[in-house]
Amino acid sequence: MNAKRMLVWVWLLLAPALGGSLGYGFLGFQGAWQGGGGGFGTFQGVALGGESWGGPRGYGGVFLAGAWLPVGPGVFLLPALGLGGESGGFLLDLGVRGFGFFREEGGWVFGVGAGYALPLGSSGGGWYVRLAFGGGRP
């Protein structure tokens, strides 16, 4: 492995530890009720993480990346693009999440999310909304 590649991997592994991080559980709706959870590491205005979910209409998970945008004190917006899969096959996730920390320095967090899961070559997917609760630091 060359030095540049090693540096990229070290940065990807350390970025969540050096920046902020948050984890949460959520209740959502995508044609039927679903439950799940997710987490993100944030560093220098970028968020990397993922979500997984399950419910009566199937299950899935997605890796997400997006811009971590401060909107106000303790409030952040995360427009994200994701790639993953669900019980029907691969999917592309286009969505936005909003998070509000009860204290600016971190602690409990409340979030909302909405987006569209686009199935790639299979059925499923569709619009979704989510209500999240968890904790972390911005």
Image: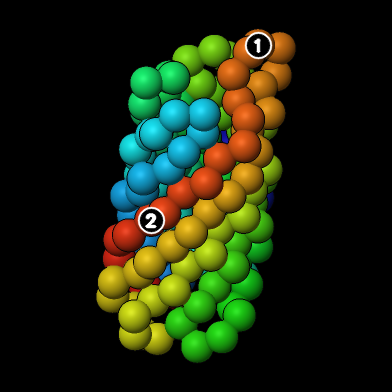
Q: Relative to residue 106, is residue 59 depicted above or below?
A: above
Can you identify the residue that label 2 sits on?
A: 132
Q: Position of residue 72 (x, y in %)?
A: 56, 86
Q: Is residue 1 visible?
A: yes
Q: Secondary structure at mark 2?
A: strand
Q: Relative to residue 30, is residue 27 depicted above or below?
A: below
Crowding around mark 2 (Cα neighbors within 10 Å: few <14, some 14 to 19, many 20+) is: many
Can you identify the residue that label 1 sits on?
A: 122
Mark 1 is on which residue type? Answer: Ser
Residue that appears at 71% across and 12% down: 121
Q: Which quarter shows the N terminus?
A: top right
Q: Which quarter shows the C terminus?
A: bottom left
Q: Relative to residue 107, is residue 31 depicted above or below?
A: above
Q: Position of residue 133 (x, y in %)?
A: 32, 60
Q: Relative to residue 55, is residue 115 depicted above or below?
A: below
| Applied colour scheme | rainbow
